[in-house]
Image (spheres, rainbow, N blue to C red):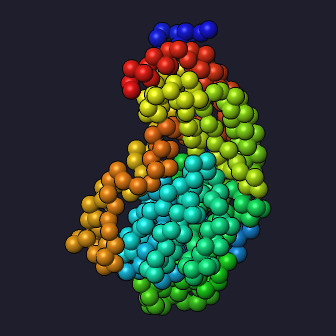
Amino acid sequence: MSKLAAFGGTAAVPKDRRHVQWPLVQDEDRKAVLDALDGARLVSDTDGVNPVSALEENWARRFGFEHCIAVSNGTAALSLALAALGVGPGDEVIVPALSFIATGLAPVHQMAVPVFADIDPVTFNIDPDDVERRITDRTRAIIPVHLHGAPADMDRITEIARKHGIAVIEDAAQAPGATHRGRPVGGIGDAGAFSLQVSKNIPTCGEGGLLVTRNAELAEAMRRGRQFGEVIESGRERDYVSYGLGWNHKMNALQAAFTDAQLARFDAYEQARQGNVTAFLARLAQLPGLRVPTALPDTTHAWHILRFRFDPAAFGLDGVRPQALRSALRRLLRAEGVPMSQYQLMPLPDQKVFVDRVGFGSGYPWSVTGAPGTVAGEGYPVARAVIADSLTIQKRHLHPGAGELLDLYADAFEKVWANREMVATLAKAAS
């Protein structure tokens, strides 16, 4: 049995192997950006083909979407989709209790109230049964999140939405390339929002986002929304007339050019990532008390973030709090060179912005609907359990050459599990 690095042993992952670049910036990315910089079309409202319109066309073609609209970031994409669908003051939007803060903020940006639903314990995505329980006569939309790259249960969600006559906006920020029953996520609901933030599976050189839809009228509404409510058409002189409420949510040419170059290599990266991650998870799945992320039948998981759950009872630690085991494992695995992180410290309903209901002042938008605010620490038992007993690995595994590093990570997990008595001692002390 090897001595744990936390107590003076040699780390399973050598320090010179721990740094992994992401995004992987290649010569073609640099050339694409320089070509765009030297071009005459640096913004999306110029006439004719430009880097932004080229990215929109290439993204739509690669994933099979009918319409694609590039915007400044993924949060703007969600807000624009809600606005284009007419969601506004007095409306409610159902969102998952576990997600990045943007999912909950986007409805508030439209003066609508986010209504939180609990999640599934395996996929970590919104629970359709809880969604249906929370529908009221004010519900106008559902935002399922394909969290960490795992497709949500879109069959159930779209069935519920049709039954109640409400819209579905997919938050696919973490899931480009993921599929549900052969369909690309983002293109199943009324609209889908992607993020191109630098940490994503298909990144830009900073911030960026994309909207997709099958509906031509909705696409035009979202295009107007990103450009001050104006109508921008090829061959039509700009009239500077705002035909409705709009924002300045445009993407610039340098961001688009960088992402387009990354998109061209996505298939090769994705093939390598699928092989690397599935082999890594197969090794870890053999360890008692550890639940690895899984791709459900008829889905393709994009593996943006790897979330691991720890079960004290299965680990042989009856009566130990999940948080205590999680804390012990985090300490020991990080000492071995595995960058385990908690990532989310609380479910969305516990975020102060929702608990305090500051919003736009005087309690808006909650005071418009009379909807009760969230109470920190109450409800959403599955989301709370997942946060209490899980840790994540981010970014390092996205590199297509990360297979050897993931093998070292697996060595580290196996080493820690071989020292289960020490893990037990630390966990019991923290309980």
Q: Quadrant of residue 144?
A: bottom right
Residue 309 or residue 73, whichever sits in front: 309
Q: Is residue 422 above or below residue 333?
A: above
Q: Is residue 329 above or below residue 256?
A: above
Residue 79 or residue 329, whichever sits in front: 329
Q: How many marks?
A: 0
Asked if residue 83 shows in the view, the reply is no
Q: Quadrant of residue 307?
A: top right
At which x and y percent is residue 156? 65, 67
At which x and y percent is residue 111? 36, 75
Q: Is residue 227 left or right of residue 54?
A: left
- Give the quarter of the figure containing the N terminus: top right
Residue at (35, 50) in percent of width and height: 377
Q: Is residue 431 above or below residue 421?
A: below
At which x and y percent is residue 176? 65, 57
Q: Is residue 136 above or below residue 301?
A: below
Q: Quadrant of residue 67?
A: bottom right
